Image (cartoon, coloured by chain):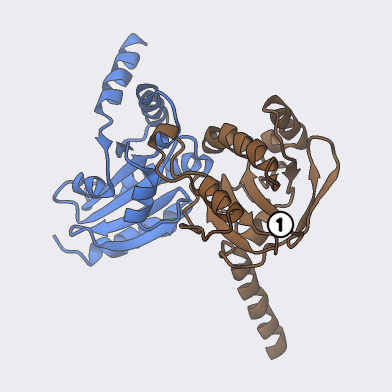
Chain colours: A brown, B blue
């Protein structure tokens, strides 16, 4: 009985830990998710030698939409410099039909996403990263280590922006320099997690 | 109908703008012994779902020394401010939300820093007269538990 209780406590603590936002310096979890655009599986293997950006976003959030064009532009610009972007929709599409694969495909095509738009149907990747909101960014270096987490920019309004967090992080990493601000507060709509089975 | 629209326009104009968290705290009535700040936005699905519960708790505690103030973060989204304020006013009128609301026009990060939250809304914070935080609820409130908590807090703060 004691062992069972201990196991339950360990499980509970593990669940809490997993729900925490991944820290800068932590190893990024890998994933294999379906790209809603073409139905193919896209794999991210942290430590693959590439600088990567994991973007938690979605279809329904006005705040995420306000950043969408910026993320697309960043994804296009940095792809030319060897950076791989992964956009992930972790919202529960059973509860919100706007988050279905068909809707994701339509959105990605209408905005001409230069990166895959991946369905995290059971929200387990969002949980693994501790992503809370959309948009929520994690920059992972070639060794698979999180080097920046937080917002894209500190304001959805470009004219009020004071800190371009994602841009600055990528520029620093590409120049082999330290990132001035490695962790920022991501703001946006809460991720609509699929209830755990 | 035209009277309703006229009232809405007036209400939009009355949705006061605030630039900081301190300004929010200064907006409470001086006799409010327990001060509830709910940070929300019309584009936030759980915030919208929570609003009737907040209204119910606020209404049930009217006259008890508890004051609620909602702080809309609708301005965080780019767009025409007047239109957004109008949207908020329409929302509040449509849901018959009677507790006072303010329209935040400062930097979102500054508000998150001032109230020490991680940027996720809704969040409901409870303060005393001096601005000391007494309690916080991150995410959607449970109306029954929240009311019980407020009753407990108000009991400890005599007039």
Residue A66, visible in the rendered structure = yes
B2 over A97 or under it: above or below: above
Quadrant of the image containing the N terminus of chain B = top left
Nearest the viewer among A75 and B66 is A75
- According to the picture, the residue beneath numbered tag 1 turns out to be A124
Q: Residue at x 68, y 90 (%)?
A: A2
How many residues crowd around disc 1 within 10 Å: few (fewer than 14), some, or many (20 or more)?
some
Q: Residue at x 56, y 38 (%)?
A: A64
Q: Chain of mark 1?
A: A
Q: Position of residue A164 (x, y in %)?
A: 48, 44
Q: Position of residue A106 (x, y in %)?
A: 73, 28
Q: Is residue B21 left or right of residue A105?
A: left
Q: Is residue A109 left or right of residue A165?
A: right
B158 over B143 or under it: above or below: below
Task: Indicate the secondary structure of the residue bearing disc 1.
Answer: helix
Residue at far right of view: A40
Res. A28 image quadrant = bottom right
Q: Residue at x 32, y 46 (%)?
A: B58
Q: Is residue B63 left or right of residue B50?
A: left
Residue A195, visible in the rendered structure = no
């Amino acid at each position: 009985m004691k062992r069972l209780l201990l196991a339950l406590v360990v499980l509970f603590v593990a669940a809490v830990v997993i729900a925490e936002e991944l820290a800068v310096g932590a190893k990024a979890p890998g994933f294999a998710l379906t790209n809603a655009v073409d139905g193919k599986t896209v794999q991210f293997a942290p430590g693959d030698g590439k600088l990567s950006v994991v973007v938690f976003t979605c279809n329904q959030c006005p705040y995420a939409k306000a950043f969408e064009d910026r993320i697309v532009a960043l994804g296009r610009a940095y792809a030319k410099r060897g950076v791989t972007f992964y956009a992930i929709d972790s919202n529960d599409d059973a509860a919100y039909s706007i988050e279905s694969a068909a809707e994701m495909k339509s959105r990605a095509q209408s905005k001409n996403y230069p990166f895959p738009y991946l369905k995290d149907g059971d929200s387990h990747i969002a949980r693994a990263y501790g992503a809370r909101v959309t948009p929520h960014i994690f920059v992972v270096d070639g060794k698979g280590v999180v080097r920046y987490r937080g917002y894209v920019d500190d304001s959805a309004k470009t004219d009020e922006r004071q800190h371009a967090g994602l841009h600055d992080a990528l520029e620093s990493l590409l120049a082999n320099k330290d990132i001035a601000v490695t962790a920022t507060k991501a703001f946006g709509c809460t991720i609509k997690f699929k209830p755990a089975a | 109908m035209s009277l309703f629209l006229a009232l809405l326009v007036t209400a939009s104009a009355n949705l006061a703008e605030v630039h900081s968290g301190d300004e929010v705290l200064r907006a409470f009535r001086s006799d409010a012994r327990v001060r509830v700040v709910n940070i929300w936005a019309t584009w936030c699905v759980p915030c919208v779902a929570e609003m009737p519960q907040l209204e119910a708790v606020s209404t049930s505690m009217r006259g008890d020394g508890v004051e609620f103030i909602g702080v809309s973060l609708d301005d965080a989204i780019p767009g025409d401010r007047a239109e957004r304020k109008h949207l908020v006013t329409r929302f509040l009128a449509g849901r018959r939300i009677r507790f006072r609301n303010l329209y935040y026009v400062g930097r979102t990060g500054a508000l998150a820093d001032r109230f020490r939250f991680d940027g996720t809304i809704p969040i409901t914070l409870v303060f005393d007269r001096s601005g000391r935080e007494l309690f916080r609820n991150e995410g959607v409130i449970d109306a029954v538990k929240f009311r019980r908590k407020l009753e407990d807090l108000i009991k400890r703060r005599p007039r």
